[in-house]
């Protein structure tokens, strides 16, 4: 009986860890699949983009966000679903595109978060491949505080991922071209944001699983 209990206990701990590791997605439209476009729309102004893509806002001074579908031949195919976007950093001015995502629940200052997305830069129209910056903000039209920077690859998708501690509470995850690197078009898709499980949460879930299993084996 004891052997059976401990074999089951180990399985319960593993299941508890796996369940906690299944991160809860905080972005409502991270792959841009929810939109009103019937096909690719290039160079959207900020207001045009917001009208097309619910729960994603545009506020960069470049104001020319591309929304592209699977049939489009400019750059790689979408990495997730049927849609992707591209952000532009102008060549001769410091103007860049920027977007923000609605969150299912607000970001809590001091907590750790995992962020990831797919990126590729294309040189068909501009020569560079500047970094992409991610921020936390309380305003849908303001970048807020920088929390992560990733460098895309030329022509093909690469997944950029990292962990950050939220500098403050926030209602939006923001994304923009690096203003310090002019002349780049960066294609983006498949954004994810989730809370990093706290060790105490893992311990509580594992203990609960053990106690539940012990009660069952005692019957």
Image: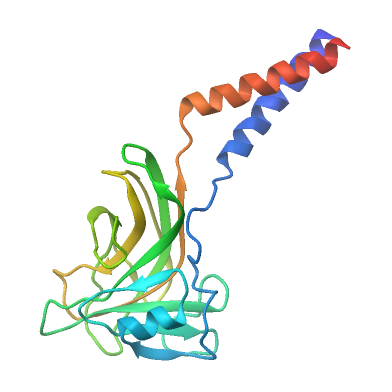
Q: Quadrant of residue 61?
A: bottom left
Q: Position of residue 217 (x, y in %)?
A: 84, 14
On screen, residue 38 above or below 31: below
* Residue at point 49%, 73% (across, down): 32
Q: Which of 8 and 39 is in front in this view?
A: 39
On screen, residue 71 above or below 183: below
The answer to whether residue 163 is left or right of residue 61 is right
Query: Which quarter of the rendered picture does the N terminus lie within?
Result: top right
Q: Position of residue 201 (x, y in %)?
A: 52, 28
Q: In which quarter of the image is residue 60?
A: bottom left
Query: Which quarter of the rendered picture does the C terminus lie within?
Result: top right
Q: Which of 1 and 47 is in front in this view?
A: 47
Q: Position of residue 70 (x, y in %)?
A: 54, 84
The answer to whether residue 10 is left or right of residue 63 is right
The answer to whether residue 171 is left or right of residue 191 is left
Q: Position of residue 87 (x, y in %)?
A: 31, 77
Q: Nearer the viewer, residue 183 or 141?
A: 141
The answer to whether residue 126 is left or right of residue 73 is left
* Residue at point 55%, 22% (across, down): 203
* Residue at point 54%, 74% (across, down): 33
On screen, residue 201 above or below 91: above
């Amino acid at each position: 009986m004891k052997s059976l209990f401990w074999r089951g206990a180990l399985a319960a701990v593993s299941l508890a860890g796996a369940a906690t590791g299944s991160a809860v997605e905080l972005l409502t439209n991270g792959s841009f699949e929810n939109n009103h476009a019937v096909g690719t729309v290039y160079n959207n102004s900020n207001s045009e983009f917001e009208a097309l893509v619910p729960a994603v806002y545009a506020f960069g001074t470049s104001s020319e966000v591309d929304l592209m579908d699977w049939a489009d031949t400019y750059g790689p195919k979408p990495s997730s679903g049927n849609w992707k976007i591209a952000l532009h950093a102008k060549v001769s001015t410091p103007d860049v595109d920027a977007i923000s995502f609605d969150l299912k629940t607000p970001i809590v200052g001091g907590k750790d978060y995992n962020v990831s997305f797919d990126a590729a830069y294309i040189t068909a129209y501009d020569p560079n491949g500047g970094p992409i910056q991610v921020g936390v903000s309380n305003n849908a039209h303001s970048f807020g505080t920088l929390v992560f920077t990733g460098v895309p690859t030329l022509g093909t998708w690469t997944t950029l991922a990292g962990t950050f501690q939220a500098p403050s509470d926030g209602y939006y995850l923001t994304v923009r071209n690096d203003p310090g690197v002019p002349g780049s078009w960066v294609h983006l898709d498949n954004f994810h944001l989730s809370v990093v499980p706290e060790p105490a949460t893992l311990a509580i879930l594992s203990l609960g699983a053990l106690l539940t299993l012990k009660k069952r084996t005692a019957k």
